[in-house]
Image (cartoon, rainbow, N blue to C red):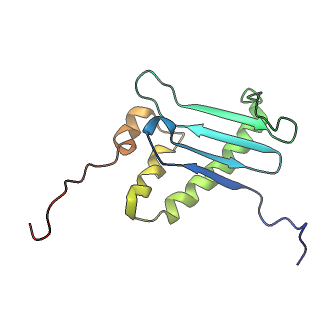
Amino acid sequence: DDPDATIHDALPLINVWGDDRVHSLGVITRDWKYIYWPYGGEGFEPTEELFEISYDPLELSNRRTDTEQLQRMRTVYDAALADWKKHAVPFHDYRRFGTVFDRNLSWSEKAAAARPPRHSATKKGE
């Protein structure tokens, strides 16, 4: 009814396609964008990015050292992750990302979940 009305406070940004190294979960609000990159294998470290998109729309300045805003966006992120864990569909291994994207777990605690199980192809009737 009111095209200028706020319909959500935050939206999740999800990338679970492709290689484990590029999987990410983020959240975006009107003014801020937080992204968590969970991959910690092969010398990579899980990392966080925080951008004040209302002033930095090209995302050139990572503001993760702004501890107060980082904590606010982590809270928004944690709520999005809790929603993922509650509502993830069982097919395509989406539920495993509830573990992969948990920023409170070490890479060693979630490495097995980061790699989808290998399904062997069998012929019908075998």
> Looking at the picture, does residue 63 appear above or below residue 28?
above
* Horizontal side, residue 65 vs residue 114: left or right: right
In the image, 34 versus 125, the foreground residue is 125
* Horizontal side, residue 8 vs residue 92: left or right: right
What is the x, y in percent for residue 85?
Answer: 50, 58
**Res 79 quadrant in image:** bottom right
What is the x, y in percent for residue 51?
Answer: 76, 36
Residue at x 14% of width, y 69% of height: 124
Q: Residue furthest top?
A: 43
Residue at x 58% of width, y 50% of height: 14
How many tags in the picture?
0
**Res 123 quadrant in image:** bottom left
In the image, 78 versus 101, the foreground residue is 101
Q: Quadrant of the N terminus?
A: bottom right
What is the x, y in percent for residue 24?
Answer: 55, 42
Q: Residue furthest front?
A: 123
> Looking at the picture, does residue 87 appear above or below residue 102?
below
Q: Residue furthest left?
A: 126
Residue at x 77% of width, y 50% of height: 29
What is the x, y in percent for residue 48?
Answer: 63, 33
Q: Quadrant of the C terminus?
A: bottom left
Residue at x 48% of width, y 62% of height: 88
* Horizontal side, residue 59 vs residue 115: left or right: right
Q: Residue furthest bottom?
A: 1
> Looking at the picture, does residue 92 appear above or below residue 74?
below
